[in-house]
Amino acid sequence: MSRVHPRPLFENYIPSVRTAKTTMSFAASSQRFPAFVPHPLVRGSHLQTIFGALAGTAATTDMAVRHIVDLDDGDRVVLHDDCPGNWRSPQRVALMLHGVTGSHASPYLVRATAKLVARGVRVFRLDMRGCGAGAGLADGPGHAGRSEDVAVVLETIAGICPASPVTVVGYSMGANIALKLLGEFGDTPPGGLDRAIAVAPPIDLAACCERIERGFNRIYERNFVRRLVAQARRMRATSAAIAAIPLDPLPRKISDFDDRYTAPLSGFRDVRDYYQQCSAAPLMRAVRLPTLVITAANDPLVPVHLFEQYERSAAVELHVTSCGGHLGFFGAPGIDPDRWWLDWRILGDFAPAAVEQAVPDGPPCSG
């Protein structure tokens, strides 16, 4: 496959990245963002990843309004609507997509939502099938290719916020779903979608699954499998299809779980068919809306060479940090107010759109 690198956005210095097949050197070429400098006590890919996953958020009272969304196959998902008091139609809104086994309450979603709402952006956080408040509302499992669900959700948001443009912000699995959706719909996106941000997207699911099965990364895999099995146990109470598949022996790898549960319950022949059909990488060349991809060169779960390997359209901007791990990006003091570098870059990308002036008599929050 040809390699095209339109508008790469790299930090001042990123060292060579060595993989089994290639050695790449990301050179200085942009000042779009301040360079990410890791906190002196949270250096390295694993510390960044683990700290990002375990660090909580300040105690908050979730005042979001819940919307139940009916999907085409009869399953339902939940939207959490955080609307600032000064928001008016048709100002911009954001749709946040969590990662595998996450929910609307995932710390990275809560932090970013709080910052966006404080800036006046209306935010919808999606609980995918069987996740968070959506537990018990879906027969089928969520997975990394559920772009059709997000398309329905975007149309629902268009009904709640007519004429408001929408930015989709996806994290990890949610980022892959966002990129897949963008590639599938091209220049005719659903609802008011007009731009996207994808953070650490596992664009080649098979390659990422292979990476997580190696060495220290097995710690992450065991955690994901444990949480996936726990989610399957909960769904067995309301889903006859899931209850029909035995849990014993317990899956030991993500690929085992996907082969036994995700693939057959979602209409795929097997795990290979699932990974092939749901990876966003082959679709990035078809993306037509402005899209920012942020990833770290030392992400232990998403090999950075994938972003050099696959072709992407001129609409996709790539920013690679030298450090940050997987959804970590906890920075040194003095750069951002609370050291969560990623949150402030997302907020900054909203800045030109978030200040769009509302019609003076535009309606406030509704729905």
Image (cartoon, grey):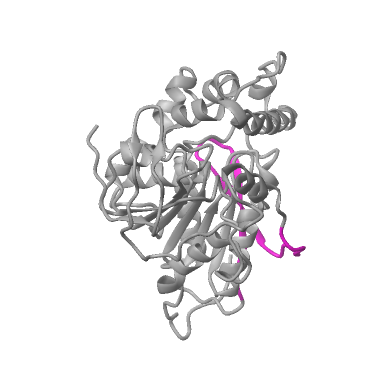
User: Where does the image place residue 170, in percent across and percent down from the top left?
Assistant: 50, 50
* Residue in front for this viewpoint, 72 or 128: 128
Q: Residue at x 52, y 63 (%)?
A: 160
Dividing the picture into quadrants, the one containing residue 335 is: bottom right
Residue at the extreme bottom? 360
Residue at the extreme top? 249
Q: Residue at x 28, y 44 (%)?
A: 286
Quarter holding the C terminus is: bottom right
Quarter holding the N terminus is: top left
Residue 296 visible in this rendered orientation of the protein:
yes
Residue 167, placed above or below residue 115:
above
Give left or right: position of 292 versus 324.
Answer: left
Dividing the picture into quadrants, the one containing residue 132 is: top right
Give left or right: position of 229 versus 43.
Answer: right
Residue 154, placed above or below residue 213:
below
Q: Which residues are magenta?
A: 57-84
Q: Count numbered badges in the picture.
A: 0
User: Where does the image place residue 275, in percent across and percent down from the top left?
Assistant: 45, 27
Residue 223, placed above or below residue 156:
above
Q: Residue at x 53, y 20 (%)?
A: 264
User: Where does the image place residue 350, in percent across and percent down from the top left?
Assistant: 45, 68
Give left or right: position of 83 versus 246.
Answer: left
* Residue in front for this viewpoint, 358 or 203: 203
Q: Residue at x 45, y 37 (%)?
A: 303
* Residue in front for this viewpoint, 269 or 12: 12
User: Where does the image place residue 117, in percent across and percent down from the top left?
Assistant: 59, 70
Residue 78 is a magenta residue: yes
Give left or right: position of 312 versus 360.
Answer: left
